[in-house]
Image (cartoon, grey):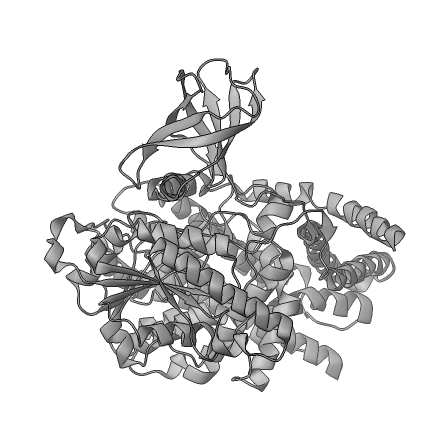
Amino acid sequence: MSERTNANFLTQNKISFSIILSFACLAILLAAPMDSSAQLLSACVFLVGMAFSTRETTFYHKYRHLFRMFTLIIGIALTLRYLIWRSTNTLTAPDLLSLIAVWALFLAEIYAAITHILGCLVNAFPLIRPELDLSEFDEEQLPSVDIMVPSYNESEDILEITLRSALMLHYPKHKLNIHLLDDGGTLQKRNQSDEIKAQEAKDRFADLNKLCMRLGVQYHTREKNEFAKAGNVNSAIENTNGDLIVILDADHVPTADFLDRTVPWMIKNEKVFLVQTPHFMANPDPVERNYFSAFTRMPSENDMFYGTIQKGLDYWSSSFFCGSAAVLRRTHLDLVGGISGDSITEDAETAFDLHKLGYESVYVDRPMVSGLAPETFDGFIVQRMRWAQGMTQILLLKKPFLESRLSWYQRAGYMSSILFWLFPFSRVVFMLMPLAYLLLDLQVYHASLIEILAFAVPHVIATYMISTLLFGRTRWPLVSELYEMLQCTFTLKAIIKVFIKPREPSFVVTPKGESLDKTFISPLSNVFYWLTALLAIANVAGLYRLINEPLTRDLTVVVLLWNSFNLIMMFGLLSVLIEKKQIRSHSRLPAHDRVSLLDSLGNSIEGHLLDLSVGGAKIQLAVTPKVKVSDTPQLVGWSESAQEKVILPCDVKQVDVEKKQVRLVFTPESDQQMNEVIGYSLGDSNRWKSFQRRRTREIPYWYGVKHVLKVSMKPFFTHVYLGLKQLNKK
């Protein structure tokens, strides 16, 4: 298992196993036969205990890990108790269709429980590693490094920023080689039958060759586009010889200290094949931009995976390769023939192949690579469908649950990560079952109101309490439900295709760097219109049943509440489908560096940054600004990347005299100035770390619910307005 660096980990291990053994007895007690009243009373007692112990985990005392385990075990016991009750008391139905619905719902609940329990195991003890750097090593000890930037259809502007940042990494230059791997200019593409596309490939080939020559990096392409990204990287591996290989997606810009903080783990332990770091997204995804408008205040979807789950997997020696922002050891890759290519998630597959050979991975939880999230909902779905299909391929083709060369906890880690992507099955069932009861009169759930209160409600509450305990700082309430409802109808179809033909899916590149020059409704909206209409009709039918069928009123109330929850979420997610106008090509993030502004006469005004991007900055000045729009001052600030002060030429775009604020656009006129702008704006990992720390905060559950309710109705009317507007244009 990976090296433990926190002094408390040995203690945690002892506590973990002793508590698991102790509370196994408690789980048995919870499974003991009880009537509904006794079950309700005992469940309330345990939920109060969970609430108390969850509160204790927030205090830094020596028993907080014990309280954490208590919460997890009691919550899991309540879930198991619920499933035992469901399996022994509720799986009956008056007709065949109802029986099918009953079992579909029960299987969806079993799936949800399995993923929940695996998640509890994986995230029980997130591993906190110390920060290492290269200062303790002599230069001759440092391995040579090949930085590889695979590209397919990304623009030259995006690639140039990534390549320039790679050239500015703090590492001996004679041991560092930068390579652009262009799969958009292959011989196959340049000679294709479509003359227009062939010419585009030829132009790309010529332009990127010139870019690489100008920057002093190596350009690679190949004859055929075989095996997608994995084939592209493997082709370059065959033609390079660095000891370590760093893979950066075309839009993934490294900070100057990336190698400084990752390579030491490779030097210290020769069994380490991978050092993975977070993917920090410098722009909001469609959900964050269109629904929450809270990119700088709310943890992103990435924060939950990279800020919590990867650290949990790291504890169990199961953190895996995520395709970019990672360092790999060449000799270990050679053992498995390079990057694996049986699935379209070649990254996780490669890690699996090397983990089963006994090699180790390390996860360094410091954001040192900034990338671009998909700008449109369409691009977002393309990306998630590829992930879902690829992980399903690994499940079917690699069968990690049967891999004897993995330890039991590694198998659990991989199965947790893979099974998550089967959520469309359960999510679709959870949306359709209320409709089956309210519209089709199928008996999907055979239970009284008191039984539901005694068994089902405590299970649901315990699940949410554990989710808050594990992910409270990196995932706000109801956000997971929103993301899953948005994806499930599309990814379900994609996953079914994999089950039918596991080797058929092909790699599809996620669109990046798109510019939205107007507000419009996503072309993927129709399925959500139909679902919203069905849920609304079902609510009307439910109210009718509530009034006219008193014998089933208890169950109708429960199902009506369930359906109403789905309807409210559906109304809310309609806002994600309104693609908001976004012309700015570079997302500006909060920054607080001390700077000064030099006007054309050499006068200096002190101030500090409010936001910053590679395109420009906003400054809060100490005194009333004397500059005006179209002036060309210079911004002076400390560059962590260059380790010196830099002077950046600018144009003034906006002046707010009352607030003493100035908005600037950078105007570099030489390669040196361009490097300084990129290094200053994108080369400091402390800035990304500070940004993440400010937005990863826990909020009360009811605050999240209130927020969802607040934004639920307005999108519906916006869709009606934009829809009518589009019809009028036609």
Residue 483 left/right relative to 211: right
Which of the image's four quarters has the C terminus?
Answer: bottom right
Q: Percent x, y for residue 26?
A: 38, 63
Decide which of 237, 214 is in the foreground and name it: 214
Q: Name the residue rendered at 38%, 72% in the picture.
A: 233
- 510, above or below 469, in the image: below
Which of the image's four quarters has the N terminus?
Answer: bottom left
Q: How many marks?
A: 0
Decide which of 349, 520 is in the foreground and name it: 520
Q: Percent x, y for residue 720?
A: 82, 49
Decide which of 54, 704 is in the foreground and name it: 704
Q: Quadrant of residue 89?
A: bottom right
Q: Name the residue rendered at 43%, 59% in the picture.
A: 210
Residue 309 visible, this angle: no
Q: Percent x, y for residue 527?
A: 74, 64
Q: Name the residue rendered at 20%, 49% in the picture.
A: 133
Q: Quadrant of residue 221?
A: bottom left
Residue 442 left/right relative to 35: right
Residue 65 visible, this angle: yes
Q: Percent x, y for residue 343?
A: 46, 78
Residue 69 left/right relative to 303: left
Decide which of 442, 554 is in the foreground and name it: 442
- 328, above or below 584, in the image: below
